[in-house]
Amino acid sequence: FLVSRNPVKAEFTVPERYSSRIKEGQDVEIQVTAYPGETFSGKVYFIDPRVNDVTRTVLMKAKIPNRDGHLKPGMFANLNLIVNTKSDALVIPETAVMVKGDTTSVFVISENNKASLKLVVLGIRLAGRVEVTQGLREGDVVVVEGFQKLREGADVQVRFEEK
């Protein structure tokens, strides 16, 4: 929820379990429906020391420069906070992951174009993507569509698409 003009002050709440990962001065990004595809960046400047005992959330505030005046008080915004960054994370589309009971797996394609099922351990999930912490190596070719019909050792024809 946007409160002032320039800089815009955004008020938001964060679940208690994530609140320890956020510090004053941390970067935030917001998007508003009035400007689709446009991102506005700012910084956290206030973290309430109390947890709301009903919602189990912590109130936080961020300042976002608004030199062009696009952002207006009262607008609702989608806000992104980056709480963890990993420069060497292996990330795949979440749609490539198969879940069966307590196991997660993906199909990879070998050098001789055969399907191979690999058990994987997942990490952080974000915006349709998921980190793979075990089971894959950089350079593995992962099947992201049509794996429901695949079987271990099946011959496949690889088609790469940029997304």
Image (cartoon, grey):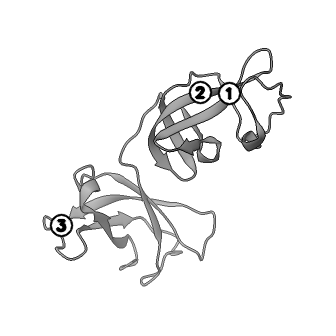
Q: Nearer the viewer, mark 2 or mark 3?
A: 2
Which residue does the numbered mark 3 point to in the structure image? 48
Query: In the picture, which quadrant includes the C terminus?
Result: top right
Which secondary structure, mark 2?
strand
Label 1: few (<14), some or many (≥20) within 10 Å? many
Q: What amino acid type is highlighted by mark number 2?
A: Lys
Q: What amino acid type is highlighted by mark number 1?
A: Val
Position of residue 44 measured from the top left corner of the image (x, y, whole percent): 30, 59
Q: Using residue 32 as the reference point, say whether residue 57 is left or right of it.
A: left
Position of residue 8 measured from the top left corner of the image (x, y, whole percent): 39, 72
Label 2: few (<14), some or many (≥20) within 10 Å? some
Q: What separation in Å lies between label 1 and label 2 (alpha carbons)?
A: 7 Å
Asked whether 68 or 43 is in front, the reply is: 43
Which secondary structure, mark 3?
loop
Query: Considering only order in the chain, which callout, 1 or 3, is on the residue closer to the N terminus?
Result: 3
Picture quadrant where residue 43 is located: bottom left
